Amino acid sequence: MSRRSSGRSKMDRRTLFRYGAAASAVAAARPIAGTQKPPASGNGAVPAAPAFELEELSIADLGKRMASGQDTARSLTEKYLARIEAVDRQGPSLRSVLETDPEALAVADGLDRERKAGKTRGPLHGIPILVKDNVATADRMTTTAGSLALEGCIAPADAFISKRLREAGAILLGKTNLSEWANFRSTHSSSGWSGRGGQCRNPYALDRNPSGSSSGSGTAAAASLCAAAVGTETDGSIVSPSNNCGLVGIKPTLGLVSRSGIVPIAHSQDTAGPMCRSVADAATLLTVMAGADPSDAATRESSGKGAADYTKFLDAKGLSGARIGVPRKSLFGQSPAADRVIEAAIAEMKRQGAVIVDPVDLVSASEINESEFEVLLYEFKADLNVYLAGLGTRTKSRTLAELIDFNEKNREREMPYFGQEIFVKAEAKGPLTEKAYLDALEKDRRVSRVEGIDKTMEANKLDALVAPTSGPATLIDLVNGDYGVGGSSTLPAVAGYPHITLTAGWSRGLPVGISFFGRAWSEPTLIRIAYAFEQATRQRKPPRFFPTADLTLEG
């Protein structure tokens, strides 16, 4: 479902995860061609983005504009479509949106009629949202995971979360670009690149990597192409692009949010989550997305454990008395810039009344690198084959083996920069009854949960663990593929535990995220802590689409 670009260490960690007046011109779904030149890395001028009246506005702000009559769902939709045209397809050319819904304005009109009749469905009524192109939408948009193999494929039904969002009154404005197949195709991929969309770019520095695999969702939300976005994660692909794009990202507890109708990587780690410009927006979106789904067995465990409304935990004093552990040995020391930012953040948390337990021992993610990859390979083959079979005649590629064959036959378009080594490794795996898979899965759960997060938090009576999410965004490299400085996503991802990131500071004009993670179903605690930190520090800044990072800035 998603996999981060986290750099390489030891066995190659990347191998583990990897748009008023113009509205009528873009109302039809407009796929973007996949071929393009790589972004320039020099200081050449980039067409300036026009001023945007909705820039940085929250979901609540947009709701107030509609309630007052200043805007309607239709006018908001038109404005965001115009923004996509001006910034994503022209101007800086972010390439974060693959297509927009040709029916979006009609949907908005229907929601406006409801509001005029005195009915509103909640805080998302009339709010335009972008969703990642591995999340099914049963409309005139396609669901392709960025691959040309699924080009033109219309999903048979909405994903469960798509249905939940529509029922809450959200307008599914379009589908975002992503690292193709959620970055689980090649060991040398460039995060944010797909056959359908080409290379998505970071809005803070256009030659920098937006990270993956929810790169389009990250870039689009950061650049105010939508009110908020939906991403997916297997290991880091919500939190890593949120780090690189200055967002709040929530990777929920496995089972809190349904995966049905989402192109999979691995059922033991896959989840969807919100990617937003504020903790409040992320909590609002999570409230709607969460819920038990009969088609996803993992969500049954959320009964009685998930909250009915995550916005109830937005407490500006939420750091007071919170016990937060600092696992220096395992999750610090990967990026000097990130470490400096997090040290300042820890000092601020102390001033806000948090009890900082420093240091605490936490098992290193390196202990499960190989077993995690083994599990993902086995589950990817099994889960993807089931997903493809469910598409029936909507696609000609109905197995992983047939996808491999498609890629080979369309190498010039699908593999111009990197191959499909991970596809090949996964295809070689047997059924999920094999001992190698079962042993690797057992090790993953034991090390990440029992001997990892659970043990450390219990021993130190912690409410959360804190660490740098990752370092500042690295350069896009279509020659060698991704590189990076590591990150903190693996243990909570493998454990299936919640993880929240938000911007803690800056380096050379690039955002640096802080991560809070903890035990299963601890989203309320993490949201409280993250919101209090956000309100105390106010580090979020809108992007200005610079061609490259500003080396004259501190960091």
Image: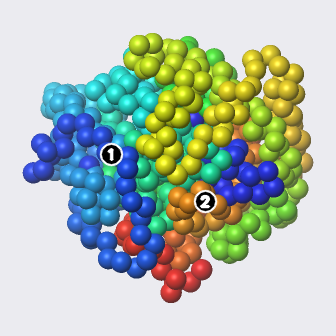
**Camera-side residue of 211 and 254:** 211
- Residue drawn where x is 66% and y is 38% of the image: 422
SS for callout 1: loop
User: Which amino acid lies under the numbered mark 2 shown in the image of this protein?
Assistant: Asn
Q: Which residue is mark 2?
A: 480
Q: Is residue 320 visible?
A: no
User: Which amino acid lies under the numbered mark 1 shown in the image of this protein?
Assistant: Ala
Position of residue 269 in the picture relative to residue 225 (left or right): right
SS for callout 2: loop
Q: Residues within 10 Å of mark 1 (few under 14, many from 20)?
A: few
Q: Which residue is mark 1?
A: 33
Instruction: Please determine whether, in this image, residue 400 is positioned above or below residue 221.
Output: above
For the N terminus, which image quadrant? top right
Residue 199, percent from left and from top? 44, 53
For the C terminus, which image quadrant? bottom right
Residue 216, percent from left and from top? 43, 49
Q: Quadrant of residue 467?
A: bottom right
Q: In this figure, which colouring scheme has been used for the structure?
A: rainbow
- Residue drawn where x is 25% and y is 59% of the image: 90
Mark sitting earlier along the chain (2/1): 1
Q: CA distance from mark 2 to mark 1?
A: 23 Å
Instruction: Please determine whether, in this image, residue 164 is positioned above or below residue 474.
Output: above
Identify the mark at residue 513; answer none if there is no mark.
none
Q: Quadrant of residue 27?
A: top left
- Residue drawn where x is 37% and y is 39% of the image: 175
Instruction: Please determine whether, in this image, residue 134 is positioned above or below residue 472.
Output: above
Q: Residues within 10 Å of mark 2 (few under 14, many from 20)?
A: few
Q: Is residue 542 visible?
A: yes
